[in-house]
Amino acid sequence: MRFLLVSVFLLLSGIQAHAYPDFIGYGYRSCLVCHESGGGGGALTDYGRGVFASEIAANPLRKWLNDEEAAQVSNFLGPVEFPFWLRMGFKYRALTVERSPGTKPKRQYHYNMQNDLNFNLFANEAHTLGLITTVGYVENPVALYPNKTMKEDSYLFYREYYLKANVAKEFWLYAGMMDKVFGIKTANHTAVNRAPLSLGQNDQVHAGLVQWARKDEDIFLQYWLGNLHLPKEERRRGGSIMLDKKWGSMHSWGFSYLNESKEGLKQNIYSLHNKMGFRDGNSLLMEGGYRVETTEQDGTSINSNSYYIFTQNNLNLARGVFFVSGLELSKNTTVSSNPENLRWDLGFLIFPIQKVEVRFSGVNQKTIGAEDATKDQWSLQSQIHLSL
């Protein structure tokens, strides 16, 4: 009876959070360990849910529910077990931003960033052959760009749907609509290494992906036709290759290359990344990249070159509580006098109980020109993530 009451409490109190690349500090280098997608993001595996409940999230109910029991009620409906062929999930993420805090022109905005229902079907108990699907709901279709809703009068859209198969001991194949594989995939989809490179929250494509998942390294080869739900002229056709290789006991390094194009636009991106894990869940993520973008105007090709640097540090203060800091730098180098864009943030990432995530952060943005610097722009952000 006590176990049942605690299970119901956990079910009603919220949802499991994403597994993040920051969790390399717990020894998890490969995304495939915890995610259905080898490239990370999206639905968690049963093992991923259990890891989050038993190792990462705080457990204020430890007196009544130990970590092993917490893992047992980390499913979609807590202690309710689904048949092996069915797994479900639901995710809700909301963001509140206050710009220019403490000043007269301050403004506050609220965004419902994610309302996703995940529905997965498997052909075997080992979950080595399955169909992964996610449908989302959006309050304003404009915010979905470059993706689009199912119909013009609908607020529903396809987040992902793909087949996955373990065709040999170390080889996985994926086919369908999915995220592009490139660099470090952080939860912050507006980061300098994500949305500005067409790798944001809604940049899914119809693709085929091969993953060679070895013990100490992952090699990805992906080719895509673009988002086939978009008009032909808006589809970005291309591909990417990525390596992530373990070094030391809790670190990995790698590189990525991406090439894609649509009518009048081409881009090539090169990047190096390094993920470092330390004892007790601490981590440091680093990625640097160079982008070459070519546009066609009146028969003339115009190149635009830029670079970016992304860093993020997680300091584990206590179980379920992290101090997070990040620094992002980018510059368009086509003209030497172009300004540098600098973003710096400090905050806290908290998992107060399994299935609940809360973030608080202060963000500073600055544009530094060749001869002058603009006034700093400050914002306060709070975020809550719930899922089943």
Image (cartoon, rainbow, N blue to C red):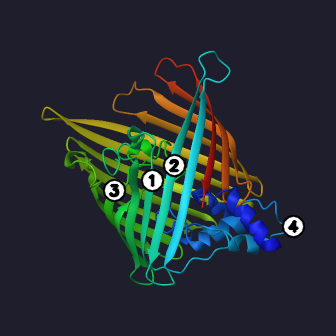
Labelled pair 1, 2 in contact (Cβ < 8 Å): yes
Q: Specify which label sits upstream in the sequence, 1 or 4.
A: 4
Q: Specify which label sits upstream in the sequence, 3 or 4.
A: 4
Residue of label 3: 205
Tell me where residue 46 sits by quadrant.
bottom right
| Most foreground residue, 35 or 115 | 115
Which disc is residue 114 wearing?
A: 2
Q: Which amino acid does label 4 sit on?
A: Lys
Residue of label 1: 136
Image coordinates for residue 20, horizontal then vertical, percent: 58, 58
Q: Specify which label sits upstream in the sequence, 3 or 2.
A: 2
**Which of the two discs, 3 and 2, sits closer to the camera?**
2
Q: How far apart are marks 3 and 1 (CA)?
A: 15 Å
Circle 3 packing at 10 Å, graded few (<14), some (14-19), many (20+), is many
Q: What element carries label 3?
A: strand
Circle 2 packing at 10 Å, graded few (<14), some (14-19), many (20+), is some
Task: Relative to 24, say whether 344 is above or below.
Answer: above
Q: What residue type is labelled 2?
A: Gln
Circle 4 packing at 10 Å, graded few (<14), some (14-19), many (20+), is few
Q: Specify which label sits upstream in the sequence, 4 or 2.
A: 4
**Which of the two discs, 1 and 4, sits closer to the camera?**
1
Task: Relative to 119, say whether 300 is above or below.
Answer: above
Horizontal relation, residue 113 to residue 74: left or right: left
Q: What residue type is labelled 1?
A: Gly
